[in-house]
Image (tube, helix red, strand yellow):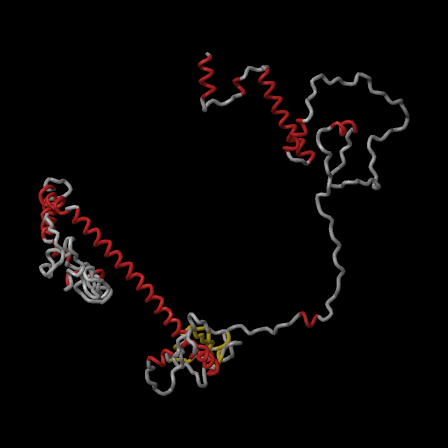
Amino acid sequence: MSSTNNSRASSPEFVFNEADIPPSSPMQRAVHCAVEHTVMIVEASRLFNIPVSQTIQAFRQQSPLQGMFTLQTDPLPIPPCTDTLIPVWSYTRDTVHTYPFNPVIQMDASLLRNSPLPSPIYAPQTPAKSPLPPYEPLSSPESEIRLTSPQTEGPQVGQHPGEGWVPNEGVHTYPGVCISDNQGGPEILEFLFYEQDKDEPRLLATRGHGCHIYLFPLYACPDKFPRRVLTEKEEFGFQDGKLFSPLVDLALVKEGDPSLAAEVWVYRGAHHSCKRLAKHMAQLKEQYTEARWERRASVCRLACANAIACIEPRVLSGLNQDDHFSPSLHDKAILTYTDLWLECSRPEGDECTWCRKAGHDTHRCPAINKCLYCGRWGHLEHSCYHTHINCKKGKICHMPRDHQKHDTMCRADVCTFSA
């Protein structure tokens, strides 16, 4: 039995169950007392409005009573018989309660003096109401209240839409800002609004008050006479961030043409986009070149590990009985492997996405590739004429044997063994 009890005590799955305790046992009475004391602590904390931790400390300062509590043995006094009735409870309107929200509990002074808990604090549950300010009428109601005239509902063609709208007439007229009328012909919109946003300036047009609003890109209004194309120096005068740029901005304000100022903003925004994208392309170009150098280094490591001698015999003869390939598919794979140059020279797409020429893929375009043999731009490795420029004495030759310039003079003098 002792071994069984020890195993149950050490097991983490053992759970205390009150039903297993014999009735009227000391342990069961101790459990009941502990539960009652816990409930008493919680009720005392709620009644006297103090934390549970303080209640436990207050109860802990005094030991519980060990003796029996005796009731009073003297009989209660019996009042004499009279002919008048004595009211048990009387209530009048003059009765005043000191605490209307929390009633006062009358307790014996000896109990309060010997109580381990602090005295309760009674406070009103709602704050006192502040008096309302006196009413003062407005001195000038006409200045505070503005009556608005009723607006006519529905579109009003030809009526001015409101503030900021200008008529589509005069020097800066936009004949292209038009829509189709009921007869199918063009109808020029009568009112314009310049939305002068430096990122994307737009032109808003409408037929009148309450009519539909149409959006158009805001361009410079063309002159009535044909004009020549700007030179490169004249174009440079509209760029921002220069010493003369504030003078150009002030001249645009003096000119008073919102469309011309918007066109200058469009030019400057496009110029900044070109410079930003050019820098991004340069960064991508360097990353692309680094990736090609990493690929070249991996090829050199495969050559040093004699990877062809390890893989090629197994590909040609060691996989004939493999269940993963059918005989016809295996023969086609062997034929393709023996003619690798035909397969690698075949482009994957119809045309190059960079130069838009057919015959090569984008990653083999000479316009974006740097030769890894001579370090120059504009051609690939198989078209390089300075193949041995990086070959050094005491090293192996960097040129593959199928290159067209492999037999030219080379400074490398270390002999290699073919696979």
Find residue 269 and report its image quarter.
bottom left
Closer to the camera, 107 or 23? 107
Q: Is residue 391 left or right of residue 81?
A: left
Q: Is residue 151 above or below residue 129?
A: below
Residue extending farthest to the top is 1
The answer to whether 323 appears left or right of 278 in the picture is left
In the image, farthest residue toward the right: 83
Give 10 or 18, whichever is nearer the viewer: 10
Number of callouts: 0
Tell me which corner region of the image, top left, top right, bottom left or bottom right, holds residue 374: bottom left
* Image location (x, y in percent) of residue 40: 65, 28
Residue 6 percent location from the top left of the image: 46, 16
Pick whichever, 238 or 410, lies toward us: 410
Determine the residue positioned at 22% across, 60% down.
Answer: 363
Left or right of 371, for residue 260: right
What is the residue that sits farthest to the bottom in this orientation?
225
- Percent x, y for residue 243? 43, 77
- Residue drawn at the location 10% of the way across and 40% of the way down: 321
Q: Quadrant of residue 228?
A: bottom left
Looking at the picture, how far across and down is residue 51, in whole percent? 65, 35
Q: Residue at x 18, y 48 (%)?
A: 302
Q: Nearer the viewer, residue 180 or 339?
A: 339
Q: Residue at x 22, y 52 (%)?
A: 297
Above or below, 6 relative to 273: above
Above or below, 369 against 128 in this view is below
